[in-house]
């Protein structure tokens, strides 16, 4: 079995390649190399989360980004405007889709939410959760009581 770090790195690389291809299909060949220490973390408005975008613009449209949630963080039932595909890089995330059962996802796990599917997100206490997200639009969090 491959080491967890190799699996995570491979999944992140494949997601980045896929995101880049979807965001600029006619772009000339290029390389975009970002070491972990070069990530530029910024606050996600109205949350304790941080985001570091590596492709696109997470505030305006399609993007590939790392998101960091503090240990113990919980977002009650909500959705996101854009379809998104995610790899858990660190920590343990518990997701509960509306009408479904809670599932714990540790490093190397993958999930997606499409069509504004409502869900509850919790980062287990004890360690921050780090995610790698490929989204088809701007990043937001729409509380269920205001979702249309």
Image (cartoon, helix red, strand yellow):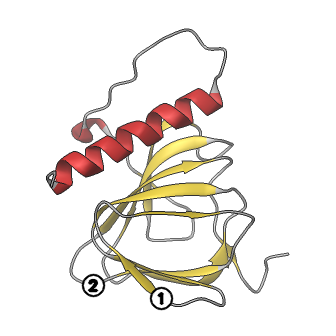
For this view, does 61 lie left or right of residue 108? right
The correct choice, above or below, for 19 with respect to 95 in the image is: above
Residue 23, quarter of the rendered image: top right
Tag 1 secondary structure? loop
Residue 139 position within the rendered picture, expressed as x and y whole percent measured from the top left: 62, 55
Residue 40 in sight here: no
Name the residue rendered at 54%, 30% in the picture.
20
Q: Does 4 sit left or right of 47 as displayed?
A: left
Q: Is residue 43 left or right of residue 46?
A: left
The residue that label 1 is drawn on is: 102
Q: State the residue in front, 6 or 29.
A: 6
Q: Residue furthest right?
A: 148
Q: Residue furthest top?
A: 28
User: Depth check: 91 or 140 in front?
Assistant: 91
Considering the image in quadrants, where does the N terminus appear? bottom left
Q: Is residue 10 visible?
A: yes
Which residue is farthest front? Answer: 1
Instruction: Tell me the quarter of the picture where residue 100 sits.
Output: bottom right
Q: Which mark is residue 125?
A: 2
> Badge 1 local density, few (<14 within 10 Å), some, or many (20+)?
some
Earlier sequence position, callout 1 versus callout 2: 1
- Residue at the spot 69% in from the left edge and 73% down from the top edge: 117
Q: In the rendered image, which quarter is residue 127 located in?
A: bottom left
Residue at x 48% of width, y 57% of height: 86
């Amino acid at each position: 079995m491959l080491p967890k770090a190799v699996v995570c790195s491979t999944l992140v690389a494949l997601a980045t390649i896929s995101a880049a291809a979807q965001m600029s299909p006619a772009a000339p060949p290029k390389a975009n190399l970002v070491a972990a220490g070069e990530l530029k973390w910024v606050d996600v408005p109205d949350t304790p989360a941080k985001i570091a975008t590596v492709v696109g613009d997470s505030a305006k449209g399609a993007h590939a980004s790392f998101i960091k949630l503090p240990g113990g963080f919980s977002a009650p039932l909500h959705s996101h405007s854009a379809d998104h595909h995610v790899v858990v890089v660190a920590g343990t995330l518990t997701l509960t889709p509306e009408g479904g059962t809670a599932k714990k996802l540790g490093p190397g796990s993958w999930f997606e939410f499409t069509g504004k599917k409502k869900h509850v997100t919790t980062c287990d206490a004890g360690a921050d959760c780090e995610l790698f997200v490929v989204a088809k639009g701007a990043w937001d969090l729409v509380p269920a009581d205001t979702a249309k």
